[in-house]
Image: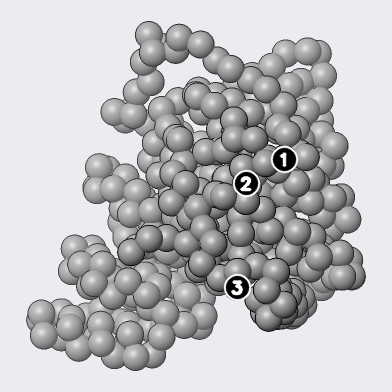
């Protein structure tokens, strides 16, 4: 029986993880949950799964949840909150496996502390490795514990690497759907709305990752993540656009062999793979080869999608550059969703913030978070300055009510 903690239990990956657990009750047990701000779903999950501990975002939310649980006759669940609560969830002594699925750097400290506590971690939060990958992977090596990727692309690479050693790899190929604007001329980018950017052609995901997919920043983050996870330089990681999203990644070996991983576009499969590794167990997540009619590939257009170029540059520089890249992107995407900047302004804002951030040497999570906060403040200041000068009219590309 594998005992599980889920950081981000109310998000899409968290809910999919619980779906997998429900399908295999003899294999997995939920021990702790970090549920964030969604109190209604947190209450439902607490009722259904009866974790030892559940964490929410704020103290007021914790009091609310505790009161609701008490009214329902549930008093055995400990309710915590905030960053300390998340760390408690991730390092609980009864937990064997931690699913890290909190979006952004909010899950960074808890993920790092889970690794330090000797837990096996399944990573669905790419921002952790983008911002602090060198620290996290070094600690995992010290602990002798694997970091198991849940992102479909890196999960696919992990599976392909079972066919050869990392020393035998010539190149890792990360596939990209191309997002909703693969065939949209760059001249039309100024008119892109929030609704259009959130209409991903293949995957159903949270808002930030969907916008990142539309800008190809998500793929840029995955390049950095691949460098950290598999300990290879950025020049050995390539991106190829594959609209069908049937092949999730490929690994090219030095002898010319290429291994590809194909499966249904369902996040439950990489979650199940990570939870059961090194085993493979029977599931109903089957892919029909008769549906495999054609596979299209083309190189990404980095002129139209400059976020991918910015990510490669940050990956090569390392240090504070990748921290600033993630922080500025998170602020920029939020501003776009709110209507404060246009879609095409996202990469420009990110580039401005990253260019002013020194590489530096980050010795601790505290150092990472300090760079992160400074980059966020800079990004917000730049957005405010643009609004004040009228360069980016509020309301362009906003969601209709």
Instruction: Say which residue appears at 45% left-offset and 64% top-offset.
Output: 7
Q: Residue at x 72, y 26 (%)?
A: 299
Judge whether 293 appears above or below 26 on screen: above
Q: In terms of secondary structure, where does tag 2 sit?
A: helix
Name which residue lies at 81% across and 13% down. 255
Q: Is residue 258 left or right of residue 209?
A: right
Q: On the image, which quarter does residue 111 sit in?
A: bottom right
- Pick the residue in front: 225 or 80: 225
* Number of numbered discs: 3
Mark 1 packing: few (<14 Cα in 10 Å), some, or many (20+)? some
Q: Which residue is mark 1?
A: 304
Position of 76 with respect to 313 (left or right) is left
Image coordinates of residue 286 in percent, x first then y, are: 34, 23
Q: Nearer the viewer, residue 351 or 236?
A: 351
Residue nearest the viewer, comparing 255 with 209 = 209
Q: On the picture, is 187 further left or further right than 253?
A: left
Q: Position of residue 289 (x, y in %)?
A: 41, 11
Which dot marks residue 189? 2
Disc number lying in front (1 or 2): 2
Quarter holding residue 93: bottom left
Q: Are marks 1 and 2 in contact (CB under 8 Å)?
A: yes
Q: Position of residue 63 (x, y in %)?
A: 29, 90
At mark 1, the secondary structure is loop
Q: Is residue 394 shown above or below 134?
A: below
Location of residue 224 with respect to 139 vertically, above or below:
above
Cα distance in 3D space between marks 3 and 2: 36 Å
Q: Which residue is mark 3?
A: 109
**Residue 316, position as x, y percentages in the image:** 87, 50
Q: Earlier in the sequence, mark 1 or mark 3?
A: 3
259 and 241: which is toward the camera: 241
């Amino acid at each position: 029986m594998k005992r599980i903690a889920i950081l981000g239990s109310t998000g899409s990956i968290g809910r999919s993880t619980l779906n997998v657990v429900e399908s295999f009750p003899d294999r997995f047990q939920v021990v702790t949950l970090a549920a964030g701000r969604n109190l209604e779903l947190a209450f439902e999950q607490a009722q259904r799964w009866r974790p030892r501990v559940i964490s929410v975002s704020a103290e007021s939310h914790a009091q609310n949840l505790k009161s609701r649980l008490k009214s329902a006759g549930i008093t055995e669940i400990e309710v915590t909150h905030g960053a300390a609560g998340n760390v408690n969830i991730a390092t609980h002594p009864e937990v064997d496996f931690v699913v890290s699925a909190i979006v952004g750097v909010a899950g960074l400290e808890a993920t790092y502390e889970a690794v330090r506590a000797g837990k096996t971690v399944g990573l669905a939060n790419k921002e952790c490795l983008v911002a602090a990958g060198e620290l996290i992977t070094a600690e995992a090596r010290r602990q002798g514990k694997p970091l198991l990727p849940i992102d479909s692309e890196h999960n696919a690479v992990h599976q392909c690497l079972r066919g050869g050693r990392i020393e035998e790899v010539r190149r890792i190929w990360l596939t990209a759907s191309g997002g909703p604007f693969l065939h949209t001329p760059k001249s039309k980018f100024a008119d892109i709305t929030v609704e259009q950017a959130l209409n991903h052609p293949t995957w159903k995901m949270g808002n930030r990752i969907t916008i990142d997919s539309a800008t190809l920043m998500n793929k840029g983050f995955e390049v950095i993540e691949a460098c950290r996870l598999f300990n290879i330089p950025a020049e050995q990681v390539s991106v190829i656009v594959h609209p069908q999203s049937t092949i999730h990644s490929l690994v090219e070996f030095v002898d010319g062999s290429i291994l590809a991983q194909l499966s249904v576009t369902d996040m439950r499969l990489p979650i199940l793979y990570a939870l059961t590794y090194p085993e493979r167990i029977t599931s109903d997540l089957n892919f029909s080869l008769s549906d495999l009619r054609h596979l299209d590939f083309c190189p990404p257009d980095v002129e139209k999608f400059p976020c991918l170029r910015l990510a490669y540059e940050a990956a090569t520089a390392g240090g504070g550059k990748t921290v600033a890249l993630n922080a500025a992107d998170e602020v920029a995407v939020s501003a776009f969703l709110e209507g404060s900047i246009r879609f095409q302004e996202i990469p420009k804002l990110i580039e401005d913030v990253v260019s002013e951030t020194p590489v530096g040497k980050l010795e601790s999570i505290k150092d990472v978070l300090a760079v992160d906060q400074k980059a966020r403040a800079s990004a917000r200041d730049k957005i405010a300055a643009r609004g004040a000068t009228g360069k980016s009219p509020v309301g362009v590309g906003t969601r209709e009510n």
